[in-house]
Amino acid sequence: MKTVSWGIAAVLGLGILAGCTDSKNRMTFDGQYYRTKVAKVDKQRHVFTVNIRDVAQSLDGAREAGRHAGVSYCVENYGSSDIVWAVGPDTPPEELRIVDNTLVFQGVCPRV
């Protein structure tokens, strides 16, 4: 039984260390890390939104983090980095949607 307990402890310890390593390797934009979430709209996978949290850190950084998340989504689902943004990283600042420190983009991956 002691061997099993030590094995479990070792696996848990490695998992904790792996989690620490991941945070050091996070992609940053304008020197900041942004949590992003991409979701399809109304069951249409090619139409999506990107929520970028902690936009107050840097609007420029948040915009680039959102661009990266959108491109990654379209490449993963359609094999192309093309996006038609309704509201996106190149939208003028006064037209951006920011709610509760979260920037919201909406785009479409052109279907091939």
Image: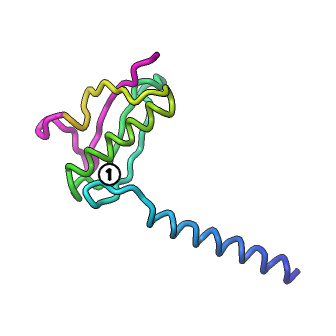
Tag 1: amino acid: Arg
- Determine the secondary structure under disc 1: strand
User: In the drawing, does residue 30 fall left or right of residue 12?
Assistant: left
Res. 88 image quadrant = top left
Looking at the image, which is closer to me, 52 or 73?
73
Q: Is residue 92 magenta?
A: yes
| Direction bottom: furthest residue | 2
> Residue 15's spot in the image, x, y percent?
63, 68
Answer whether residue 102 is magenta in the image: yes
Q: Which of the 4 image quadrants contains residue 104?
A: top left
Residue at the outermost left position: 94
Numbered label tally: 1
Q: How far across and down, in percent of the image, does residue 108 sit?
A: 36, 24
Q: Which residue is mark 1?
A: 53
Q: Position of residue 45 (x, y in %)?
A: 47, 25
Tell me where residue 100 appears, x and y as whole percent: 26, 50
Q: Identify the residue at image location x=25%, y=44%.
A: 63
Q: Residue at x 85, y 80 (%)?
A: 3
Q: Closer to the camera, 16 or 104?
A: 16
Residue in the image at 48% along x and 24% along y: 43
User: Going by the image, does 41 lie left or right of 93?
Assistant: right
Q: In the image, is residue 108 above or below residue 49?
A: above
Q: Quadrant of the N terminus?
A: bottom right
Give the residues in magenta. Answer: 91-112
Task: Looking at this view, name the residue that lies furthest to the right.
Answer: 1
Query: Which is more toward the observer, 91 or 43?
Result: 91
Q: How dense is the environment of label 1, judged by Cα within 10 Å: few (below 14), some, or many (20 and up)? A: many
Could you say which quadrant of the image residue 94 lies in? top left
Q: Is residue 59 above or below residue 2?
A: above
Image height check: is 32 above or below 8?
above
